[in-house]
Amino acid sequence: MYLKIILISSCVVQLAAAALSFRLIRITGRSGAWVFIAAGVAVMAVRRLISLVDLFYKDVDDISFVPMPLPETVAFLSSLLILVGIMMIAPIFRGVKTIERRKARETIRRLDDVVELLDDAIVAVDTEGRITHWNNGAEYIYGYSKAEILSSSISNLFTPDKANEAMEILNEISSGAHIKNYETVHLRKDGRQINISLTVTPIAAATSGAIVGASFIVRDITQRVNLIESLRKSLDDKTVLLQEIHHRVKNNMQIISSLIYLQSGQITDERFVEMFTEMQNRIKSMALIHEKLYQTRDLSKIDFRDYVHTLAENIRASYTRWDYYLTIDIDIADIMLNIETAIPCGLIINELISNSLKYAFVNGQTNALVSIGLHCDEDGLYELSIRDNGSGISSDLDIKDTKTLGLKLVKTLVEHQLGGSLELISEMAVGTEFKIKFCELVYNQRL
């Protein structure tokens, strides 16, 4: 009888120790040590069950099946000590796990507090578009309280013309896509439209990973949109004003040019007529800059190739007393120049082409050619070249100490206004070439 009691008690104690060990595996995160302890105690319990069954069902006369009382008593006491030890250790692990859970709950609570206190609206919806979460920021932006809006459709926040937009967003989210900084228009409770920026992310189930809803982060950008629109309108107004200024400057210069032309019609001396014509061309070259600026949306730079084409044709038309055929070849890269650089360059081209038309070609010449080139290297250095294939300039001419007004003006514009260098290449009966190197001028703020 004693042996049966010991075996039964030992089996119960070992089963209890095994059950507690397996419980601790869950608490401690499946620690390997507890797995071995639980397995070892469980094996001991099974062994005791086998001994107990043998004792009840085997022939008592066969003493080979009967366990000895003393070893079984020792085994019972050992099992009891193991159980007591496990029971003493278990609360420690439970306490640690409880602390961890408490910290996790505290962290979640703090996150919930942060979400609630955000100025942005945080709205959660299910797959049908029904609102399941509504923070304080959403109440402020839309004017609805939680009691009013929960379980209603997210589409109620969209304007009537964008009624299908909500479901289109949810359909896109259902495939796992994310939407970032999507700008649209929503409705407040009071009916006022607000500009908002949406960031939408899918909400997945923790176990299956299936999409069960979506999280909307909504930012009210009405003030920003209104400010941008105000700045755009102000910029458009200033653009129109600058265009009008360029237009009026061009008109005033054309009036001056016309007055000079009318005045030259009363002069009989060819020398003075020529002087008036040169003055008129200089004014036209500057007026043309303002005309090109008026015609473009970029009021700070002009297409210099287009400008030179028009300028060259204007100069050609002003000199009608030729008996030779002239070709003007223009090789200019796709270059935009600001007004500070374009005006002196235009005046330089006007002076040098005019000189070629007046002095370079002889009567009856059939292959008269004027070439204009402008290119820019990688360092931002421009090279302007004006060349003709006329009679050339005398070697006695000193470009640094020239007496003619036109070349004086060219030298002044190159050295003092553009800050560049001027090189003259001329050979009698071959032609003349002027090479000018400069950098684009930087606009100096005057106000």
Image (cartoon, rainbow, N blue to C red):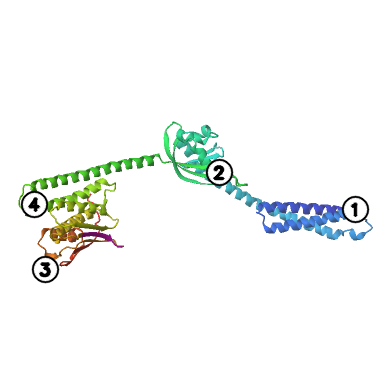
* Marks 2 and 3, the one that precedes in the sequence: 2
Q: Position of residue 130 (x, y in %)?
A: 55, 36
The percent position of residue 17, horizontal first and vertical second, equals 75, 53
**Mark 1 Cα within 10 Å, few/some/many (few <14, many 20+)?**
few
Q: Main secondary structure of the magenta part?
A: strand
Q: Is residue 88 above or below residue 137?
A: below
Front-lying residue, 131 or 433: 433
What residue sits right under mark 2 in the picture?
174
For numbered disc 4, what is the local secondary structure? Answer: helix
Residue 376: in magenta span: yes
The stretch in magenta equals 370-377
The crowd level at tag 2 (other Cα within 10 Å; few <14, some 14-19, many 20+) is many
User: Circle 2 sits in a helix, a strand or a loop, which is it?
Assistant: loop
Nearest the eye: 221 or 349: 349
Residue 396, disc: 3
Q: How far, Cα to Cα, is label 1 from label 3?
A: 140 Å
Residue 156 location in percent, x, y? 49, 33
**What amino acid is labelled 4 in the image?**
Val
1 or 4: mark nearer the eye = 4
- The answer to the question of whether label 1 and label 2 lie on touching residues, with beta carbons closer than 8 A, is no
Dots 1, 3 in contact, CB < 8 A: no
Q: How many marks?
A: 4
Residue 273 is marked as 4
**Proximity of marks 2 and 3: CB atoms separated by less than 8 Å:** no
- As helix, strand or loop, the secondary structure at mark 3 comes to loop
Q: Give the residue number, with chain letter if any, for mark 1.
A: 57
Residue drawn at (63%, 52%) of the image? 96
